[in-house]
């Protein structure tokens, strides 16, 4: 209850209603993000250029079996695209002076962050289809494929990596390039620690990288068996879900702390 | 039942902790003078109190760095106050941010629209964030774009808009949800005559239809024309709060005579005249501040006759809000 006498001024929703209203508003944020950021420099560089360059760096001159080629490519594209919008939005909006208008709207910072997660999620999903089609069309992977596992994997992983990428824009800078440095320092080691384009058990250190578990899901979806034993698939999904929830929570807390520093006189 | 004020502010303060770079700059500034800072804290807003009535246009006037934007940011839930309380129709914006922000509209200083979206898309986005239904969004956007003379450009990307058009679009965005209170941070600064005239006209219209408006400005004409009451803020403190007319009265004890001489005249000779307080020379224009206009005019005519001077034009002036403003600021600094 805000104040007794002012019922005609403030509308008050129930707690559950308020939650759904905010989720609905976060979709509006996501739509805006997709319209605005798909062609911005840092997004294009990280979402398209890096995967392309890395793909050739990893694969040229090596003899890789089709399943690992496709799962490796899918892992790389997933990780790079679903983490490309998240780090850019806050510095970009701080700099282009649209953030203050957004904060003054009846939404919370969590709504904005949730919107960023949806937009990165859609980005990650859409671009994951490209290597998948490649595998189906050119390598005849159709026979052994389990499309349900692959789709679930794509959804869970792009949500998890999207929320992870929000952490990269926590420092209250207004230069998208500044977060790029942090992004590269954190994203590349994760990618390099992941056993892509090879069997997972060939690189035991891979267990520290969350991307390994997505790669495992895709391997299974393409007809391999999990590298983590009979319940491996369940383990993969659980780890990605926990990873995503953990980083969503962390992003909510940390962005709440640095938001005020973005408004300079 | 007691009527609740639209805005009520009590003991509101905002302190900033400067960054390393700013600390260095402040230390250099402070060499010799003690200015607004204490223990390296920037006191942007320092214990201010005021209230804004329902249906009022309330002006916030002050020099650069006075704390106007910081105050508006606290009132709109963007910046958290260091101290004090803000009540919007009795609601606390920091306890119930979503509900309170729902009834506010805001045009931030230096704010911008989304350049990559069209004018219409910018409005739809805001409409969605305030929970308007689809038909409400469409109708309201069309109505506002027409009012602000942007309708033909509604489907153009905002990066193609001029500065005045962007500012008008920002106003449309702020009005999208038909807010109870509208906050405007320097809405006409740097705009051409056309845009600022449209904006002023519509601010008046919306106010006449019952909207409460809180406006900061450097533009004395805007303040004089629009505001019912004006608070003058300097170095984070409100040093005067009154109607524009009452503020102007502060300077009424003095009047000014503007005199264009064709010949050059020694300023000091004019100053020696009995009823003349101050003379400012600007090329051939002499701005003469006097105590008693009748006595001063007679003295001046005498002076012109005895020195055999040629005069192009003489006029007496009403005190301007600007004079009041400068006077109050000056007095505030002296105290
Ligand atoms: N985020 C911040 N961090 C540190 N100092 C700040 C911050 N925001 C404002 N200030 C300082 O607080 C003081 C008041 O600033 P504010 O922007 O409120 O002034 P203003 O009255 O709006 O001025 P203007 O007419 O130039 O817009 C200034 O000295 C400014 O440098
Ligand atoms: Mg300002």
Image: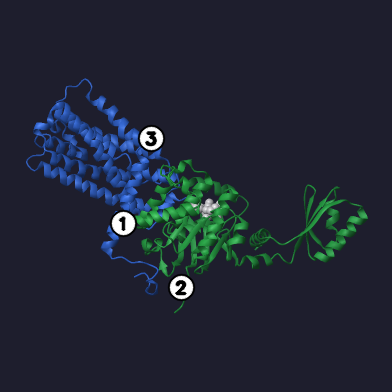
Chain colours: A blue, B green
- The answer to whether A20 is drawn above or below residue A82 in the figure is below
Q: Can residue A175 be seen in this view?
A: yes
Q: Quadrant of the C terminus of chain B?
A: bottom right
SS state under label 2: loop
* Label 3 lies in ligand 1 vicinity (Cβ under 8 Å): no
SS state under label 3: helix
Q: Quadrant of the N terminus of chain B?
A: bottom left
Residue B4 tag number:
2
Quick check: B39 left or right of B292?
A: left
Report the residue that reaches farthest toward the bottom. B1
Tag 3: Cα neighbours inside 10 Å, few (<14), some, or many (≥20)? few
Q: Are marks 3 and 2 in contact (CB under 8 Å)?
A: no
Q: Mark 1 points at which residue?
A: A22
Quick check: A32 left or right of A144?
A: right
Instruction: Using the image as rendered, state which of residue B67 and residue B120 is in the foreground.
Output: B120
At 40% from the left edge and 37% from the top edge, which residue is drawn?
Answer: A177
**Dot 1: chain letter:** A
Q: Name the residue under label 3.
A: A41
């Amino acid at each position: 209850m805000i104040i007794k006498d002012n019922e005609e001024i403030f509308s008050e929703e129930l707690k559950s209603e308020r939650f759904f209203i905010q989720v609905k508003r976060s979709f509006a944020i996501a739509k805006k993000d997709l319209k605005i950021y798909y062609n911005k420099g840092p997004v294009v560089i990280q979402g398209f250029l890096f995967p392309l360059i890395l793909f050739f760096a990893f694969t040229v001159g090596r003899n890789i079996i089709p399943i690992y080629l496709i799962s490796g490519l899918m892992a790389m594209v997933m990780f790079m695209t679903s983490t490309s919008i998240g780090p850019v939005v806050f510095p970009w909006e701080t700099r282009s002076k649209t953030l203050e208008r957004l904060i003054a709207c009846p939404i919370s910072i969590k709504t904005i962050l949730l919107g960023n997660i949806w937009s990165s999620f859609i980005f990650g999903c859409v671009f994951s289809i490209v290597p998948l089609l490649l595998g189906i069309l050119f390598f005849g992977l159709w026979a052994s494929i389990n499309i349900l596992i692959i789709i679930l994997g794509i959804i869970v992983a792009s949500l998890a990596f999207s929320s992870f990428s929000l952490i990269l824009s926590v420092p209250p800078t207004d230069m998208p390039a500044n977060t790029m440095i942090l992004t590269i320092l954190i994203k590349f080691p994760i990618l390099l620690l992941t056993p892509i384009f090879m069997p997972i058990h060939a690189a035991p250190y891979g267990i520290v990288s969350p991307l390994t578990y997505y790669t495992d899901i895709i391997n299974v979806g393409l007809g391999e068996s999990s590298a983590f034993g009979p319940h491996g698939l369940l383990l993969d999904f659980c780890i990605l879900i926990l990873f995503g929830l953990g980083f969503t929570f962390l992003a909510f807390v940390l962005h709440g702390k640095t938001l005020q520093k973005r408004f300079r006189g | 039942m007691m009527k609740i004020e639209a805005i009520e502010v009590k003991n509101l303060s905002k302190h900033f902790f400067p960054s390393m770079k700013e600390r260095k700059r402040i230390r250099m500034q402070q060499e010799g003078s003690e200015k607004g800072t204490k223990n390296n804290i920037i006191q942007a807003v320092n214990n201010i109190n005021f209230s804004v009535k329902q249906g009022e246009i309330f002006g916030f006037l002050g020099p650069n760095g006075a704390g106007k934007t910081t105050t508006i940011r606290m009132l709109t839930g963007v910046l958290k106050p260091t101290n004090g309380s803000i009540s919007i129709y009795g609601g606390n914006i920091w306890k119930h941010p979503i509900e309170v922000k729902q009834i506010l509209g805001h045009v931030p200083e230096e704010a911008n629209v989304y350049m990559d979206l069209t004018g219409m898309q910018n409005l739809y986005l805001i409409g969605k964030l305030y929970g308007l239904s689809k038909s409400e969004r469409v109708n309201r956007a069309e109505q506002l774009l027409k009012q602000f003379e942007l309708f033909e450009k509604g489907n153009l990307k905002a990066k193609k808009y001029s500065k005045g058009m962007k500012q008008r679009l920002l106003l449309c965005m702020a009005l999208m949800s038909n807010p109870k209170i509208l906050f405007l941070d320097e809405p006409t600064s740097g705009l051409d005559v056309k845009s600022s005239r449209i904006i002023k006209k519509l601010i008046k219209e919306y106010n006449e239809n019952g909207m409460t408006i809180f406006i900061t400005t450097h533009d004395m004409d805007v303040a004089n024309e629009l505001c019912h009451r004006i608070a003058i803020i300097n170095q984070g403190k409100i040093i005067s709060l009154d109607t524009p007319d009452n503020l102007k009265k502060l300077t009424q004890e003095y009047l000014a005579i503007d005199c264009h001489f064709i010949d050059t005249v020694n300023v000091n000779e004019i100053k020696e005249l009995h009823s003349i307080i101050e003379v400012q020379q600007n090329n051939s224009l002499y701005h003469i501040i006097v105590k008693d206009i009748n006595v001063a005019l007679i003295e001046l005519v005498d002076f012109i006759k005895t020195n055999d001077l040629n005069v192009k034009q003489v006029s007496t002036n009403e005190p301007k809000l600007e004079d009041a403003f400068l006077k109050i600021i000056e007095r505030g600094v002296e105290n």
